[in-house]
Amino acid sequence: MKKINVFVVPVHGTVLYPYQNLKLRISELQFYDAKMNNNYVAIVPVIGQEVDEIHKIQRFSQYGTLVRLTSEDYAVQAFNKIHQAFSFARIKIDSIIKSTPYYMVSAEVLSDDIIDEQTLWNTQMIDNLKDLARQYLTQFQMNPSPSLLQIIPEEKNINKLFYIIATNADLSYYQKLKLLQTDDHKTKINLLIQYLKTKVEEFAQTKALEQKVQKDLIQQTTKQTSRNNSISTNTPSGLPSQKLKNNDIEKLKAKIKDANLPEHVQEIVEQELSKIENASMGVDSNVTRNYIDLILQLPWNQQVEESLSIEKCKETLDADHFGLTKVKERILQFLAVKKLRKERKIVDSNGQGSIICFFGPPGVGKTSLGQSIAKSLDRPFYRIALGGVSDEAQIRGHRRTYVGAFPGSFIQAIKKVKCKNPVILLDEIDKLTSNHRGDPSSALLEVLDPEQNSHFMDNYLNIEFDLSSVLFIATANQLETIQPALRDRLELIEIVGYTIKEKVAIANNYLIPKQLQKNGLVNEQVTISQESIHGMIKQYTTEAGVRQLERVIAKIYRNIALKYITDQQNFKTIVIDQENLIEFLGPSIHSDKYITPAIQIPGVCKGLAWTPAGGKVLMIESVKMEGKGKFEITGMLGDVMKESIRTAIGWIKAYWPQIKILSKSNQQVNFDTLDIHIHFPAGATPKDGPSAGVAITTAIVSLLTGLKVKNDIAMTGEITLTGRVLPVGGIKEKILGAFESGILSVIIPHRNKANLIDVEPEIKEKMSIHLVKTIEQVLQIALEGNGPNFKMINLANL
């Protein structure tokens, strides 16, 4: 048996067996080093206190499954990928080597090879296992996989046969752990036979009981019907229950008549009603009655009169949200087009056209913006939370043949708002998942396609319903996890993070009045200075939105409410300023976020990075030492940034003879005798993205020449091997991040000139923004002491 040290991926409530193909999308793999681990990881179940008689090591099962990563499908985030994998062996953990920031264990790879497999095949035990597996699959799975039913009788490997059956059996967590931790083959096969036999017997008993109940019910219904018929021959008026039934049907007919249903819907309702009248449905008549009630409650022709006032819409949006100029402009454009089409009597052929999707970091107001749109249009609003939805039936509904069936979320929403043209918000559309119950993302394709949603078919309703009048608005935090076909149907509108100035305005106009009222205080009891609001933002929050800022303000008001309640007689107005913030909020959490280190030595450069919380200054440090021409890279960098470093080093080596810049000792650099170490501080924070090439190149050139990088300058941009500077994203956020950090001079790619239109004019007036085409221009601007002797190869025309 082989001993290995292996990276552990803990899983909750799941037991993985060998011989399984699977996909892993696990954030812990950001720490995973494929070369060090030979593409192996261990999937180990987490054991709670409630599971006894199971071998444990700390909180883990002592037994797990060894998995080999075969490939990467696509990047979900820079450090969170989907991996194709195959489980092939059990392991037994000896000890835990490392527990932070990830788990590494020493384990023994268990060989499940059967020494005398032929003898075991000839026992009755294997035949019993196959027979029970066939019975179980055909009884418990409504549509068992034909390939699975074929594999079981034909599989020649007993161990593989065992794990295939165990994987597809609906066993308890304890039972699955017991099978994983059992080493003796006969013992674990007998255990599985016992589990399957119990399941099959329980199913047979349940089925027999259901058949008996149904038989008794039919007999009782038959007797009651014959009794009613015999009595009705002598009693013209019939039974009271029959009168009630007739009255109910008459009321239902009156409702159907008043509903003014479309012709094709009217026909279906009448057919269903006839089944109830003829009593042909038996116990299913209640299902049919509920179905008719649903049809009658749906607004087949009802629409609310919406407001098309541009002025009202603008006032509503401005009252509810500060800033977001582009988003508000897009909403007003939608309204203007709709108003113009109405005035010219142009009939919509495909509903509303594009589906709007607001995407951006948390806390910037995406969900509340949807509510404001509905309010400004005078339309009903309905929110459908899609986070974690994995069942396709929640979109399309269940078929009526299933017990407990119900319509999908969209039909339920239409029924709730009682009109055909509400605003429906699809919240967190990027958090949809898929499993054996189907793919909700694919089910949404029909709903969100203006060419198709006029004929939307819900499985429960089974009648086409027109959703083209609905205004759909989706929200998402990131686009990478949205299915490409679904993303193609969305008109994407990015909502970026707020600047400090915008956050201060939001705090004054929205958050402070809201929290003041929520905590039972009045203006006379507390005053918050503008200086302290800046302090809250800079020292106690690190976000693109204002959600954390609202929590900080609420914390201050809670403290003041407590002071007032405990000593009302001596209470005086409290003024919150920068000096007493620490009294209410404790020590600052992010005190260094907006402070740029004043380090000015050769080899140190300031880059600009984009984060979900806005732009920030990223320090790049490099040192050189005698060595053999090696380059060391640290700082938890992603693959893209590592490529940028290699590109920068390649350019420097290739063009060094032509750069004509001598070091302080007037000696040319010999790369074969130097080792260079490049480091990005804050090593626990993952970093990636194609925008650091310019800053990395400048830092290394500064190191090799001894020329310092100017302390008041930061830069962004990617380079090519020929020295061209390529455009990057997030220019607005990066410039704002530099400005808030006290840096008033930035270098950006010339091809990003158009992005400067998004930067506020007052910020552009205070900053020096250098537009560059080549790395030569970057070095001439960034390095100190370059002067007239700074000569390089001219790449400006490349």
Image (cartoon, rainbow, N blue to C red):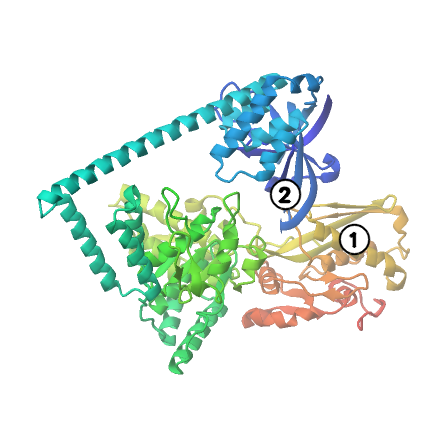
Quick one: quadrant of the N terminus?
top right
Asked if residue 175 is positioned above or below residue 697 in the image, the reply reads: above
The answer to whether the residues at label 2 and label 1 have Cβ atoms under 8 Å apart is no
Viewer-closest of 188 and 796: 188
Q: Quadrant of residue 258?
A: bottom left
The three-letter amino acid code for the residue at tag 2 is Ala
Determine if residue 95 is in view. Answer: no
The three-letter amino acid code for the residue at tag 1 is Arg
Q: Position of residue 104 (x, y in %)?
A: 65, 31
Per the model, the C-alpha gap separating discs 2 and 1 is: 22 Å
Q: Position of residue 342 (x, y in %)?
A: 38, 79
Q: At numbered mark 2, what does the secondary structure look like: helix, strand or loop?
A: loop
Q: Nearer the viewer, mark 2 or mark 1?
A: 1
Q: Residue at x 26, y 34 (%)?
A: 219
Query: Crowding at label 1, few (<14), some or many (≥20) Cα neighbours within 10 Å?
Result: some
Relative to residue 659, is residue 238 drawn left or right? left
Q: Residue at x 25, y 60 (%)?
A: 256
Relative to residue 262, is residue 114 drawn left or right? right
Viewer-closest of 622 and 429: 429
- Residue 646's disc is 1
Q: At numbered mark 1, what does the secondary structure look like: helix, strand or loop?
A: helix
Q: Residue at x 90, y 56 (%)?
A: 668
Q: Which residue is mark 2?
A: 684
Asked if residue 722 is positioned above or below residue 518 in the image, the reply reads: below
Asked if residue 251 is positioned above or below residue 776 in the image, the reply reads: above
Viewer-closest of 173 and 705: 173
